[in-house]
């Protein structure tokens, strides 16, 4: 299953980067300017780099979408961006921060998505981070959408999006169908997410050895929508 093909990747990079930027700002507020590496999992077009590299950090982005990787390299040629799963952390030393923003661990394109691979992934993050390092992530939980389909419409410069979401409470999955209408015609992507209860995430973080707290927002003026939970975890 392919996510964020070229047209949706461009739209996302154009109008839907607020949470990634807010997460990068929160990360810097926690660790301050310095040196070392920031890993951005599910990096999209690499917007986090614009915040952390001026503060002295080396940036490494990872994304499963070839179109997103191409956009990141095109828009920010000086950064390192890898094509791959968020569950496979890149080799790096001196990692001060890991950012996993935009429900990246929920996306079912990887069989480890959701609760299936969460514990092993968090242990890997814990081992990768240096002392005092911070992990910021957010997840889609069981309340992210209702069992009955709901469609929301959004307009942007040159496009219209129709986003229909529905959950399967028994399977703890969510299907998000995104219909794009623009000057070149219509295109539809279907995104499957494995939902994770936020209390399970918090317990898994602490089990992996993090000092962890739940967040209602990365930035006060940008609260998470219903069913979307954030977490800040620190290596003590």
Image: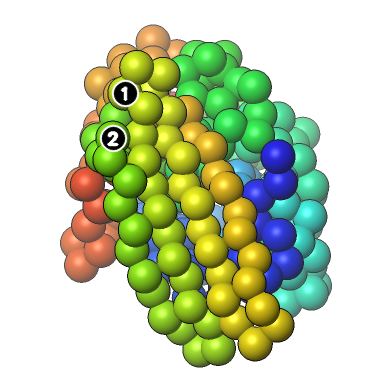
Residue 162: quarter of image: bottom left
Q: Quadrant of the N terminus?
A: top right
Can you give x and y, in whole percent of width and height, for residue 193 in the image? 49, 35
Instruction: Say what secondary structure mark 1 lies in.
Output: loop
Can you give x and y, in whole percent of width and height, for residue 40 in the image? 60, 49
- Which residue is at 22% across, 47% downward? 226
- Which residue is at 57% across, 48% downward? 190
- Mark 2: give few (<14), some (14-19) or many (20+) Cα within 10 Å: some
Viewed as shown, does residue 117 lie left or right of 85? Answer: left
Residue 84: quarter of image: top right
Report the residue marked by disc 2: 147
Residue 61: mark in rendering: none
Report the residue marked by disc 1: 169
- Which residue is at 34% across, 58% downward? 151
Can you give x and y, in whole percent of width and height, for residue 65 in the image? 72, 52
- Which residue is at 30% across, 52% downward? 150
- Asked whether residue 201 appears in the rendered view, the answer is no
Viewed as shown, does residue 163 lie left or right of 151? Answer: right
Residue 189: quarter of image: bottom right
- Asked whether residue 214 appears in the rendered view, the answer is yes
Q: Are marks 2 and 1 in contact (CB under 8 Å)?
A: yes
Which residue occupies the extreme top position in the image?
Answer: 207
In this view, 96 is above or below 68: above
Front residue of 68/134: it is: 68
Front residue of 87/150: it is: 150
């Amino acid at each position: 299953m392919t996510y964020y093909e070229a047209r949706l990747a461009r739209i996302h990079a154009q109008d839907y980067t607020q949470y990634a930027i807010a997460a990068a700002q929160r990360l810097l507020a926690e660790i301050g300017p310095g040196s070392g590496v920031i890993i951005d999992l599910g990096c999209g077009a690499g917007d986090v780099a614009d915040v952390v590299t001026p503060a002295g950090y080396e940036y490494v982005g990872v994304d499963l979408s070839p179109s997103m990787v191409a956009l990141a390299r095109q828009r920010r040629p000086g950064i390192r961006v890898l094509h791959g799963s968020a569950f496979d952390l890149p080799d790096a030393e001196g990692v001060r921060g890991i950012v996993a923003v935009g429900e990246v661990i929920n996306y079912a394109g990887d069989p480890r998505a959701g609760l299936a691979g969460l514990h092993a992934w968090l242990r890997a993050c814990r081992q990768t981070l240096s002392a005092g390092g911070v992990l910021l992530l957010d997840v889609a939980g069981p309340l992210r959408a209702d069992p009955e389909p709901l469609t929301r419409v959004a307009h942007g410069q040159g496009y219209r999006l129709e986003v229909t979401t529905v959950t399967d409470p028994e399977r703890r999955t969510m299907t998000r169908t995104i219909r794009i209408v623009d000057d070149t015609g219509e295109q539809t992507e279907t995104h499957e997410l494995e939902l994770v209860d936020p209390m399970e995430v918090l317990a898994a973080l602490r089990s992996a050895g993090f000092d962890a707290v739940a967040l209602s927002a990365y930035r006060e003026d940008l609260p998470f929508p219903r069913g979307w939970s954030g977490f800040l975890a620190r290596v003590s």
